[in-house]
Image (cartoon, rainbow, N blue to C red):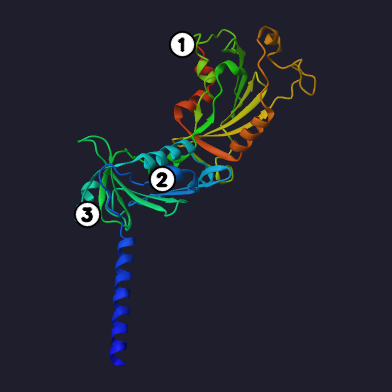
Amino acid sequence: MKGRTVIALTVVALLAAGAALLLGQASRPVSLAGGDYLYPGFAEQINQVNGIRLLTGDEAEGVTLERDDTGWTLQQRFGYAADAGAIRSLLLKLAQARVVEAKTSNPELYSRLGVEDVDAGSGNGVLLEIDGPTPPRKLIIGDVETRAGNGTYVRGQDETGSYLISEELRPERKAEKWLDAELLNVPPALIKSVTIRHADGETVRLLGLNGHLALTNIPDGRELSSPAATSPIGRGLENLRLQDVMPAAQFDGGEALAVITYQLTDGRLITVDAWQIGNDRYIALELGMSLEDENGRGDAGQESEDQATADAKPSTPRADVEQVARDSERLAGWVYLISVPRYEQLVRRLEDLLRPLPDQQ
């Protein structure tokens, strides 16, 4: 009886040891060879990705991108829209990445490739975590190889082996770089009029004429510094892009230094509030539609300032009201950091446009 018990226990022990060995082998990362995809089948899983995190070893806040029914947003910027194109480009590169060659498995040599762990304040690489597909992906992105060709050194966070892969991965480390930077894109030809009201009372008025802006309130005895002096104002909303963003409720800039109102030939009205705080330049945007009727008169029956030239201009299709409403909802409630040169285009003064007086030359 005792002999049978010993045999049975021995068999159980052997089976348990075998199972443990198999489980250990199954959980161990599979070694990749040259030409293998880094993530086989990931191309079919891209649309399953619903979260991306980028972490570094420094004190940066990191990047957390989340996707819902409305699209991609950036957690570090209060859920503002993220750059879906940049995100998709990163995911496609991962899907296309193939192993060029296996590299070191020695932790002491990871730093030479930039693939050491990024936690505990160490590491020069970027830890990329992707949620959605099964299993989640956790990849340390190291240095880009530039001496012997193109590619990037990488290592799975929970793996020992590192690899040189075929794709160049240079994910942005700063959260603001993942924002959807496009605000507006209004070509100068669509501008009907511009009014720039400065906080000190100075007002600059311009009228759109055949794709150019004419200054309507030139002081007596003065003239434009050049025929193209007003052109920068006309390009103020062309490819307008942000550098950073914050909720308007958290912005404490006081009274705007200037308020710029654009009336467009397609019926849109765009109001820009502008602030200068130290070396930074901020704007807030408000979109709407003109209430003018087909005769160029508003609700009060007052002629628009450019009605005199309306008959000479080709008609422009009226902007889609629903699209304007969507754009208004997208832009309202935020304050945007923009570049200094673009800010200067928006807030021109009369003296910026006029030829200096003789005693000032």
- Secondary structure of the residue carrying tag 2 is helix
Indicate which disc, 1 or 3, sits on the residue closer to the N terminus: 3
| Percent x, y of residue 62 | 41, 49
Type of amino acid under label 1: Asp
Q: Nearer the viewer, residue 4 or 359?
A: 4
Type of amino acid under label 3: Ser
Which residue is labeled 2 in the image? Answer: 42
Cα distance, mark 1 to mark 2? 71 Å
Q: Is residue 132 left or right of residue 19?
A: right
Which residue is labeled 1 in the image? Answer: 359
Indicate which disc, 3 or 2, sits on the residue closer to the N terminus: 2
Q: Residue at x 66, y 33 (%)?
A: 325
Q: Nearer the viewer, mark 1 or mark 2?
A: 2
Q: Quadrant of the N terminus?
A: bottom left
Q: Is residue 215 left or right of residue 90?
A: right
Q: Look at the picture and state if 94 lies above or below 354.
A: below
Q: Nearer the viewer, mark 1 or mark 3?
A: 3
Q: Nearer the viewer, residue 4 or 17?
A: 4
Question: Badge 3: how crowded within 10 Å, few (<14), some, or many (20+)?
Answer: some
Type of amino acid under label 2: Phe
Q: Residue at x 29, y 39 (%)?
A: 166
- The answer to whether residue 172 shows anywhere in this view is no
Q: Quadrant of residue 316?
A: top right
Q: Is residue 106 left or right of residue 48?
A: left
Q: Nearer the viewer, residue 193 or 358?
A: 193
Cα distance, mark 3 to mark 2? 24 Å
Q: Nearer the viewer, mark 3 or mark 2?
A: 2
- Secondary structure of the residue carrying tag 3 is loop
Which residue is labeled 3 in the image? Answer: 105
